[in-house]
Image: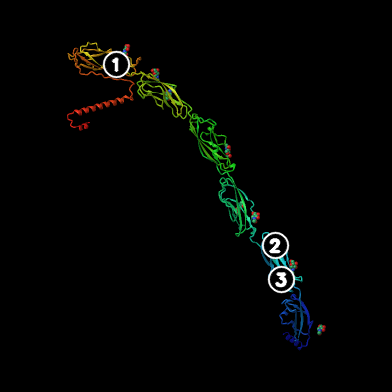
Amino acid sequence: MVKVRLLFFLLGVIGPGGGTLLYNGLPSTTTVQENTPAGTKVYTFSVNSTRALTVPPTIINSSPLTKAFRVDFSPPQYNVVTTGTPPLDFETMPNSFELQIYMEDDSETTELQTLTVQLTNVNEPPVFLGSLANQAVTIYIVEGSPKGIIYQVLASDPEDPANTLKASYSLTPSSPFTVSSTTLGDIESTKIFDYETDQRSYPLTVTVTDSGGLSVNGSLTVFITNINDETPYFITTTTSFTIPEEQSPGTILTNITAVDPDAAGFVSTLYYSINTPNQYFSINQLTGVIQIAKRIDREADPFRLNPVITIDIKVTDRPSAGQSNYTTLTITIQDINDNPPLCKKYAYSKAVPETETNGALIIDLSNECTDIDVETQYNIFNFTGLSGLGSNERFQLLPSGSGRIVLTGNLDYEDPNNIGVGNEYSLTVKVQDIAYPYYSQNIYVYVKTIPINEYPPVFNSSSYVFNISELAPPSTKVGQVYATDADYPYIGITYKIVSGGSTLQTSSIFWMNPTTGALLLADYADYETTRQYQLVVEATDSGSKTSTCSVTVNILEANDEKPICTPNSYTLSVPVDQATGSNIQNFKLTCTDRDSGYTSFQYFINSGNVNNHFTLSPSAGSNISRLILANPFDYTNGVDKIWNYKLMVDITDGNVISGSPQPIGIVQTGTVTLYINVYIPGLTTTTTTTTPSVIYVVSSKNVYSDSAWYVPFVATVGALLLLGFLGLLGYLIAKYCPCRSSPKPDTEML
Ligand SMILES: *[C@@H]1O[C@H](CO)[C@@H](O)[C@H](O)[C@H]1NC(C)=O
Ligand SMILES: *[C@@H]1O[C@H](CO)[C@@H](O)[C@H](O)[C@H]1NC(C)=O
Ligand SMILES: *[C@@H]1O[C@H](CO)[C@@H](O)[C@H](O)[C@H]1NC(C)=O
Ligand SMILES: *[C@@H]1O[C@H](CO)[C@@H](O)[C@H](O)[C@H]1NC(C)=O
Ligand SMILES: *[C@@H]1O[C@H](CO)[C@@H](O)[C@H](O)[C@H]1NC(C)=O
Ligand SMILES: *[C@@H]1O[C@H](CO)[C@@H](O)[C@H](O)[C@H]1NC(C)=O
Ligand SMILES: *[C@@H]1O[C@H](CO)[C@@H](O)[C@H](O)[C@H]1NC(C)=O
Ligand SMILES: CC(=O)N[C@H]1CO[C@H](CO)[C@@H](O)[C@@H]1O
């Protein structure tokens, strides 16, 4: 092809024309360095032409490589310059170009010459291959990785593609990485990196220098990457706490904060827990806030003995199975005054005799109360505020503040100041903490006063004299003794007869009402037997104190006795011719009266004195009176008709006490029955129509006793005799009765 062109140009030169067309300076040979930039002048020539050029000098080679050159016209000369496309590369292009430069003028004269361009080699710097060839390279190294190769720099020298000349490598900075030339650009780490402590990125420049001294720089950045390799640690430095007991659950004790060096402050990546068995505290696993979880009572076990709680806090970083660390918190539970004093009882009763002396200890409450608060200042208490009706005058806490209630007044029942309080004092005393908030409890003390029998009963008279008529029936009040007792409360005095008052028949004819002191008759008194009784009466108070008094009872005489005459029944016979005025059968009554003088006696024939035949003489003023025939009998004239007289004679006493002219009491009457038969002298057979009989009137005073043994005895014996007699009678009737048929009815009859 080139030969064809060349042939064509030769033909052109020898074609028709009249002008001159010549290269001035061509052909020629020149050199150009490889990699010459575009526009570099390679060669300059000029043209001798007499006519106008229709084709300026042009490179007409068909090889694409010759496109690396062109011809520029820069009057008056032409320059062969590089175009840069393709670049001139000694290593890849032919090292000599024969540029065919062709031109033609308007007379169609052509000219063709050759410019031989020799490409000369120049030393080029090495070039990177791989990723470093185009960009900066980023390398990540996990912290803690072992030392060693982290990257291999790929480079080559254009002059030495086989890399025989051994380019040298260097690294800036030279630490902590090195680049090895012997191993063809291996970059090695010279230390083990720690993300937390070391620089986290390293900008490096790797320089590759060829034997010609040319170098190329490459940029690398090494980043150290984090891994979870660090143990978290606590930044909370306070590990000892003192908190009061009884904080409400939820109260924040503290915040535990740990940090994880791996995480550079991301708290949420940590997980907190309490590692010791514990019920009193809880920890928020995310925030580390420790709160009280349960009531803590310093007084209760186990804090009473040991108020210190130790808890181990564990912190674990995330993800799980990460690193853990521990810290120990010491929490001391502090006592507060949260307990009032506690007492065994809150009500006490004391019985105190009224005679208790001023200054006596009534009760000591000191050891009755305790306070379970632990700290000394919280378990001390005192007693205060003693109150209660009447307490101020009588009771005090001595010494002040102590639990000793001391009597400072008196409890005497007889003290008028104490009346109205009753016999029981109700005291209130407060047992109170001496520390805030002064918890207190009331204690009630009931002091009951025991009355003491201090005083004996006292009669309102040392001796009593009572008069009582002997006529007074039993139960009659003779008099009354009265005693008082200075003791309060007055409960009761009883009275009794200690001595006196006995008679032959009875131990005492008096009865004393034990409660009223009234002296009553238990039986009739008989002046005639005993005129005066000396009694000793004793009063006994509710206790055992006694006193006595003398009681004189005068039995007052009264006309209680009737005249007793002997005989009080008699049968007399009087001859019908008895002389009037004569004493019949010399009969006389002899009368006595235990309480009346016989001078006061009066005799009356009360009945039976038909025709007043009889009279008694004297009829008054004598203890002896005779039966006198006062009028003669006269049967013959029919004046007298009866022969037997029954005279009822009344003998009255004078209604006076013997020796006293004054009538006292009633008139007593004794009676005598006289049976008088009138007979005719000489007639031995007396017509006696009435069997004279004697009736004995037994009058016994102060003798009969219901309890006499013989009364039932006599009655029983009498009844037995009567029964025996009746039985005998029945027997005899049964035996001798003619109508008796068989023995059988005998029994029936019985
Ligand atoms: C390469 O880097 C070094 C240091 O930074 C510098 O002195 C040198 O001129 C650079 N060389 C090239 C070819 O850029
Ligand atoms: C645990 O944490 C403490 C500080 O709270 C720290 O001094 C200690 O080194 C840590 N333990 C470990 C194994 O990292
Ligand atoms: C604990 O942390 C909580 C919230 O994180 C905060 O409100 C509180 O004040 C902290 N308390 C202490 C004692 O640091
Ligand atoms: C008892 O304790 C209270 C509280 O401390 C105090 O006010 C009071 O005076 C004390 N009383 C006595 C008697 O010491
Ligand atoms: C003794 O007391 C009684 C009852 O009060 C009274 O009837 C009597 O008169 C008193 N006697 C004297 C001597 O005071
Ligand atoms: C008791 O009787 C005596 C003498 O009979 C008399 O002196 C006295 O006054 C009487 N007393 C009374 C209380 O009646
Ligand atoms: C009767 O009275 C006289 C004195 O007048 C006296 O001597 C005599 O003893 C009395 N008889 C009797 C039985 O009492
Ligand atoms: C070969 C030739 O004729 N060269 C001539 C070109 O023109 C210059 C002057 O213009 C002459 O000096 C050269 O001799």
Identity, as a three-letter code, of the amino acid under mark 1: Cys
Residue at image mark 1: 565
Q: Which residue is mark 3?
A: 155
Tell me if I can see residue 171 in this picture.
yes
Q: How many marks?
A: 3
Label 3 residue near ligand 1, CB within 8 Å = no
How far apart are labels 1 and 3 at the CA level? 192 Å
436 vs 724, left or right, is right
- Image coordinates for residue 621, horizontal then vertical, percent: 30, 13
Q: What is the number of the mark on residue 191?
A: 2
Q: Answer with mark 2 or mark 1, whichever residue precedes in sequence.
A: 2
Q: Is residue 678 left or right of residue 664?
A: left
Mark positioned earlier in the residue sequence (2 or 3): 3
Residue 591 horizontal side relative to residue 181, left or right: left
Asked if residue 107 can be seen in this view, the reply is: no
SS under mark 2:
loop
Cβ atoms under marks 2 and 3 closer than 8 Å:
no
Name the one closer to the observer, 116 or 72: 116
Please tell me whether mark 3 sits on a helix, a strand or a loop. strand
Coordinates of residue 118 in the picture (x, y in percent): 77, 79
Which numbered disc, 2 or 3, marks the residue closer to the eye?
2
Tell me the CA gap for discs 2 and 3. Answer: 25 Å
The type of residue carrying mark 2 is Lys
Question: Residue drawn 36% across and 18% down?
Answer: 529
Residue 155 position by quadrant: bottom right
Residue type highlighted by circle 3? Ala
Residue at image position (31%, 24%) is 710
**Are there few (<14), some (14-19), or many (20+) residues within 10 Å of tag 2?**
some
